[in-house]
Image (cartoon, grey):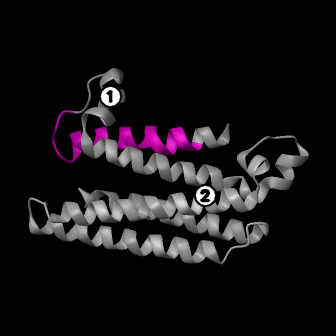
């Protein structure tokens, strides 16, 4: 249940609401007038859809990673998390690979978008954030490779690193327009 909450709130609700608010307050565009329009926003606005998808996948990684150091407690309380079912190493590796792929894909997408930016400043910011995404992907890979998934303290330290990247992505978001 906790994983679903992380995915729903961090992945979709926050991003769609933030995007709608930014449309109106920062860009003087009309925001969705009702909840139905708000819920359709990721499907009707490409940028909103991409941001929502990015953070939904990132939220999935965090949700999966959250249970890795808690396998003993989950097993003891008969909670059938992915980690209990598949093992710490498999879930940790899958989470790391998924995050690397997300950061590589978004980095490549932003570099491509930089070449089509309407202004030089926008192109500069998109390229910069794209390069940072590629560097972050490399760091995720390197740090993940050094973690023994059966050692909760190592997984927890890595998990906190992933959260820092998550909030770093939020900080970069206004510049990636």
How far from the left and from the top, in percent, is residue 119? Answer: 9, 63
Closer mark to the observer between disc 2 and disc 1: 2
Residue in front for this viewpoint, 158 or 26: 158
In this view, 82 is above or below 170: above
What is the quadrant of the N terminus in the image? Answer: top right
Provide residue 101's location: percent of width, then percent of height: 46, 61
Residue 154 lies in magenta, yes or no? no
Q: In which quarter of the image is residue 32?
A: top left
- The label on residue 40 is 1
Which corner quadrant of the image does residue 7 belong to?
top right
Magenta segment's dominant SS is: helix
Q: Which sits in the foreground, 60 or 105?
A: 105
Which of the marked residues, 2 or 1, is nearer the chain's N terminus? 1
Which image quarter is the C terminus in? Answer: bottom left
Q: Quadrant of residue 128?
A: bottom left
Residue 9 lies in magenta, yes or no?
A: yes
Q: Is residue 77 left or right of residue 106?
A: right
Mark identifier at residue 94: 2
Q: How crowded is mark 1: few (under 14 residues within 10 Å), some or many (20 or more)?
A: few
As rendered, which of 87 and 69 lies closer to the eye? 87
Residues at marks 2 and 1, CA–CA distance in whole angstroms = 30 Å
Position in image of residue 110 (x %, y %): 27, 62
The residue at the point 66 percent across, 41 percent down is: 2
Does 102 sit left or right of 33 as displayed?
A: right
- Identify the disc placed on residue 104: none
Q: Element at badge 1?
A: helix
Location of residue 156 with respect to 37 vertically, above or below: below
User: In the image, what residue occupies the spot 38% across and 71% down?
Assistant: 134
Residue at 53%, 49% (x, y): give it: 59
Element marked by disc 2: helix
Q: Are marks 2 and 1 in contact (CB under 8 Å)?
A: no
Stretch in magenta = 6-30
């Amino acid at each position: 249940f906790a994983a679903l909450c992380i995915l729903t709130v961090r992945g979709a609700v926050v991003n769609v609401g933030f995007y709608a608010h930014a449309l109106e307050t920062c860009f003087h565009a009309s925001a969705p007038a009702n909840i139905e329009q708000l819920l359709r926003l990721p499907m009707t606005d490409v940028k909103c859809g991409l941001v929502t998808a990015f953070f939904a996948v990132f939220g999935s990684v965090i949700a999966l990673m959250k249970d890795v150091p808690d396998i003993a407690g989950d097993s003891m309380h008969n909670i059938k998390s992915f980690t209990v079912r598949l093992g710490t190493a498999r879930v940790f590796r899958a989470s790391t690979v998924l995050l690397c792929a997300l950061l590589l894909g978004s980095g490549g997408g932003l570099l491509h978008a930089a070449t089509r930016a309407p202004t030089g400043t926008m192109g500069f910011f998109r390229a910069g954030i794209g390069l940072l995404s590629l560097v972050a992907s490399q760091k995720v890979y390197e740090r993940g490779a050094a973690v023994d998934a059966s050692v909760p303290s190592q997984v927890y330290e890595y998990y906190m690193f992933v959260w820092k990247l998550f909030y770093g992505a939020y900080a970069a978001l206004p510049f990636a327009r």
